Image (cartoon, rainbow, N blue to C red):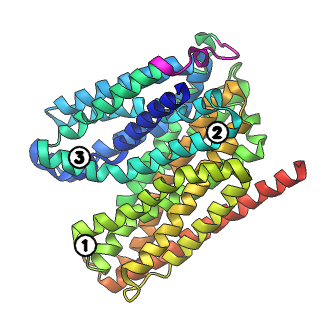
Amino acid sequence: MRSGLVLTGLSLAILLSQLGTNIINVALPTLVKDLGVEFSSVQWVVVSYLLVVTALIVGVGRFGDQLGKKRLYLWGLVIFMAASVLCALSSNLPLLIAGRAGQGLGGAIVMALSFAFVGEIFPKERTGFAMGVLSTMVSFGIALGPSLGSLALAAFGWQAVFWVNLPFGLLAFLLIGRYLPNAVDAPKHSVPATRFDWLGTILLALTLGAYSLAMTFSGKQGFSSPLVLQLGLGGLVGLVLFLAVQVKARAPLLKLSMFRNALLSLSMVMSVLVYAVMMATLVLGPFFLSKALGLDTRMVGLVMTVGPLAAAVMGVPAGTVADRIGAKLAMVIGLALFTVGAFVMSWVSLTGGVATYIVAILFVSVGLAFFQTPNNTAVMADARPEQRGLVSGLLALARNLGLITGASLMGALFASVAGDAATATPDTVTEGMRFAFRIAAGMAAAAFLLSLTTLRARRRHA
């Protein structure tokens, strides 16, 4: 009973953080009108959240390991709710962007630590199930965001998009505060705050921020833009400085020896590849469905919900399967399905219509569920208790880097064939879609091959 209430609280918190990612998107045209700003400026309402989450997610995961995960998690929920109030009360764009950045800080804490609690409060035979529930909420948040945002916007205005966070957040806070054992707030190996690697945290945040901005601007200006190249160079310099600091730090943010763990390293690479491909379906799918197949906005929204809903429905079964046959084998099966879906997506056509697209997205989404849940289960089960927050943060970082990279890279590949999406013909849009997903299918196949190496490793150790 107690663990079920904790899982409910964690699920609500995960849902909250995922709604923060995409619920505001539907309100951007309204914000342009109400705040009297250009669309290029209002996009920072979306970018600021993703930027802060990506930059801070590893640091807050480590901070939770060293100073106590429950306390930091509750503060994350409070920060998210307070920032939501600030957003709802904002009368100008700078204040709204600042509020979204505050939501990003709260969201980073929730994303970094949620999966870390599973290994602390659930027995091993129930870990896959619990991971499945949380993974389901990630997909459910992606699916629910646009529809919930549209309802709130139509009924009460754009401010309601932020007010809707408060009941979710308050209930999550009460459940976790009351039922999550206080024992998880006491690190197994306590480290004084003065030993926390603040310099490494700042350098990593700046590095990830520079990379995220480079990817964001590349989608509009191209990868050869001077600004994109400067940000890329800044990210590279930041990475070198970060690694140098980690080698010499007494209590480093990241012990580089962690990456000798093949499971963790391969998992992060696979996650980046998988979520880059998944992002391609979210970014390119609407263009293909509307511009090539001629579906209206309502039908595009309906078809686009098929994928996230399928992933949400399969999240818990995937966790149950992982408990029974082993997380690594379940992950291999998931990536095989995912790769098939990406290849089918590269064969979409005007004659195949919506049916081919739906078949492809179902393979992709079910495959994602069978990868995501077992992957999280295997990596978190392998993590030492004093590193679970950090490892959970690294998994979330890999997911975010994949989403950011996928949005830019796949968009650029699509545009290289289709040209300007506003003036492209159905044939050129289809060709752009097919070309981008041929590359995406190759990335999915690479992830599948990497997963086979983890399976062989299991057999050698068996």
Pointer 2 residue = 127
**Helix, strand or loop for disc 1:** loop
**Residue 42 tag number:** 3
Vertical arrangement, residue 200 with respect to residue 451, above or below: above
Residue under the point 33% across and 33% down: 168
Q: Residues within 10 Å of mark 2 (few under 14, many from 20)?
A: many
Residue 326 image point, x, y percent:
73, 50
Counting residues from the N terminus, which is met first, the one under dot 2 or under dot 1?
Answer: 2
Residue 371 falls left or right of residue 459: left
Vertical arrangement, residue 5 with respect to residue 129, above or below: above
Residue under the point 25% across and 73% down: 422
- Image quadrant where residue 158 sits: top left
Counting residues from the N terminus, which is met first, the one under dot 3 or under dot 1?
Answer: 3
**Helix, strand or loop for disc 3:** helix
Residue extending farthest to the bottom is 351
Residue 35 image point, x, y percent:
12, 42
Q: Is residue 275 visible?
A: yes
Pointer 1 residue = 422
Q: Which residues are magenta?
A: 178-191
Residue 288 falls left or right of residue 405: left
Residue under the point 44% across and 30% down: 9
User: Looking at the image, is mark 2 or mark 1 nearer the viewer?
Assistant: 2
Q: CA distance from mark 2 to mark 1?
A: 47 Å
Residue 271 falls left or right of residue 124: left
Front-lying residue, 61 or 147: 147
